[in-house]
Amino acid sequence: MKIKTEIENAIKEMGFVDLTDIQKQTIPLLLQGKDVIGNSHTGTGKTAAFGIPILEMIDFDDHTVQALIITPTRELAVQIKNELTKISKYIERCRIVDVYGGEIITRQISALRKKPQIIVGTPGRILDHIRRKTIRLENLKYFILDEADEMLKMGFIEDIETIFNETPENKQTLMFSATMPKPIVKLAKKYMFEPEVITSVGNNLTNADISQYYYKVKRENKTEALYRLLNIYRPNLALIFCNTKAKVDSLTEELIERKINCDKIHGDLPQTTRLDVLKKFHNGIIDVLVATDVAARGLDIKNVEAVFNYDTPEKADYYIHRIGRTGRIGNLGYSFTLVSKGELKRILEIERITGTSIKRRNIPTYEKVMDVKSDKFIEEVKTTIENENLEKQYATLNKLIQAQISEDEIIVALLKLLNTENDSSITKEDINETFENRRRNNQDNTIRFHLNIGKKQGLNISDILDFVRSKVRITAREIQDIAILTEFSFFTVPNKYGPVILKNCNHKKLRGKKAIIQVSRKRR
């Protein structure tokens, strides 16, 4: 594959050695002029997969918009623009503009007047510019949808169809999507021409380069558990996920109190603040970023060494997206999930859906953490002695000695001052828990049903919950152990609901098909 010297020089500077699987498959097809559907997860090198061939093919003497890249979030738009800017570093006439909501539109209009050949943006703001005629697509040659399934979940499909209808028929289209739900397949059939379908997801939904662990711990001890793990593993960059914005706020405060160099990102923060925090994290100014799932969507920081699930994710796809932020493009990564008593069933469900085993580990003891911190401190002292100018510090030391304080006493007192922590916030005992999943212990009090509808009909967990609860007075919590396979599904309920479910749910329509519910044979 021969590409422009300018692109080749830029990607060498970026550290490209070998192309990833998705890049090897996508780049030649795009260079041949084919439409492509890429079934690929986060962290596989998608931006370069479409960025390299687009930059190879664009006519930079033409000052009209030739490539449009649509993403579900502002953060992803900014990061794609930055990545393309790096790849096009030595192409002098290349102009790239990103447009998204949350920023003053007049700034974007000013940038668009400079006649960019490439635009990256979110659906709503792109549509806004099209209606204002500040973006014109009559000369568009390349149309890219990144994370199409996420845009479907966020309700952007109608906007995307409207944008499609503003583009010329004779263009090349690329769509990346980690999953292929029916509306995405329908979109592809309607707007793409004989697309080549490529996949780079493998058999497991999670990356084999990520070591995945979970820890049983009481909810009130989670911050202490997190603090210990951060100190033991000492990742250069770490992402911590919480399920709510309120927990992101409170956890960030707790970690700052414990002298962890961290910041936060969630949807209630101003867009400028979010981008500033991401920039600091990307550049290593902060080591730890606490985030919600939505805020971190599309986050593309290549050197994240560890992901911590402070809250166990509520859905398996959230787990996949979270841990996909580490172990990217061949690098090794770690995933740590803190599991309280009510969350254990989620881990079992995640294992089943992702086809992977999450190993159970014990939280390190307080004494072990102190030993590691002590060793780290000794290393830092040695480095300071070898590399720093300490004249001022020697002057202070001399004053202390003149005050008839011995060197040993000075050293011990300084160590005490350096290691002062708020003992009221620290739990020093063993915080590992031994609780088991109640579903496993109480199986004799439950009944398991077989349902003749599965993934083939687009069935998901919410469908089963809504279907059963619409026919039976039962809480969602009482419908457990849901397993959705290709052709059929299973779910478990307390024995008392068995007869009424068989009576009220059988032969009723679910996902356009008659539901046949039968008592499943006992599992071994």
Image (cartoon, helix red, strand yellow):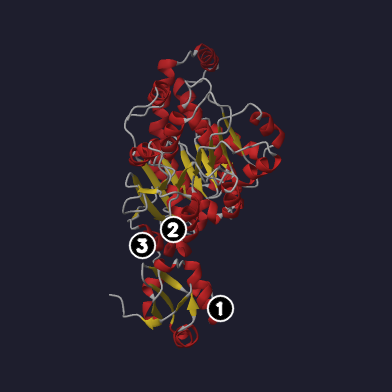
Mark 3 and mark 2 lie on one chain; the one further toward the N terminus is: 2
The reply to whether dot 3 and dot 2 touch (C-beta < 8 Å) is no
In the image, residue 256 above or below residue 184: above
Of residue 274 and residue 471, the one placed in the foreground of this image is 471
User: Could one spot residue 427 in this view of the protein?
Assistant: no
Badge 3 is on which residue? 352
Say which amino acid is labelled 1: Ser
**Residue, disc 2:** 316
Q: Dot 1 surroundings within 10 Å: few (below 14), some, or many (20 or more)?
A: few
The quadrant holding residue 157 is bottom right
**Residue 317, image x and y in percent?**
45, 56
Q: Does the rendering let one see residue 322?
A: yes
- Please tell me how many numbered marks the rendered image carries: 3
Is 397 located above or below residue 62 in the figure? above
Residue drawn at x 34%, y 40% as measured from the top left:
332
Nearer to us: label 1 or label 3:
1
Quadrant position of the C terminus in the picture: bottom left
Circle nearer the N terminus (1, 3): 3
Up-down relation of residue 262 to residue 9 (above or below): below
